[in-house]
Image (cartoon, rainbow, N blue to C red):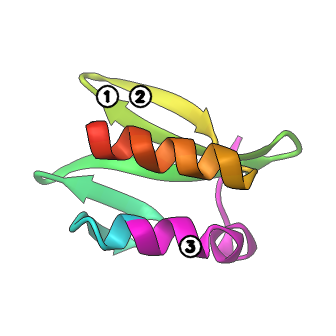
Amino acid sequence: MKHAGPAALDDLREVITAIQSRGLKEPSPGVFYRGGKAFLHFHEDRAGLFADIRLGSEWERFRVSTPDERLAFLELLDRA
């Protein structure tokens, strides 16, 4: 599964803007750091768009292809 390219990131623009408003550092498009450590990035493939977020010491993958999935992901991010 490849990292999200420019077209996928454009599709995720509302989610990315919401993440940026939460104060996470974005050293490159769609890649976010928290506390100097990689925390969140996006992937794309035929199955859709996905967010990988570091919860604890492990990465977890969440589908973010639909508006409902994106809302659920942002709610998860707020709890993380």
The reply, left or right, for residue 47 in relation to residue 35 is right
The amino acid type found where label 1 is placed reads: Leu
On-image quarter of the C terminus: top left
Residue 35 numbered mark, or none: none
Rendered residue at 73%/51% (across/down): 44
Q: Which residues are magenta?
A: 1-18
Give the spatial CA distance, label 2 vs label 3: 23 Å
Check disc 3: other Cα within 10 Å, few if <14, some if 14-19, many if 20+: few
The reply, left or right, for residue 24 in relation to residue 61 is left
Residue 55 numbered mark, or none: 1
Q: Which residue is mark 2?
A: 59
The answer to whether 44 is drawn above or below residue 6 in the figure is: above
Give the spatial CA distance, label 3 vs label 1: 22 Å
The amino acid type found where label 3 is placed reads: Glu
The answer to whether 16 is drawn above or below residue 54 in the figure is: below
Q: Mark 1 and mark 2 in contact? Answer it, CB < 8 Å.
A: yes
Q: Which residue is mark 3?
A: 14
Q: Position of residue 59 (x, y in %)?
A: 41, 28
Q: Mark 3 and mark 1 in contact? Answer it, CB < 8 Å.
A: no
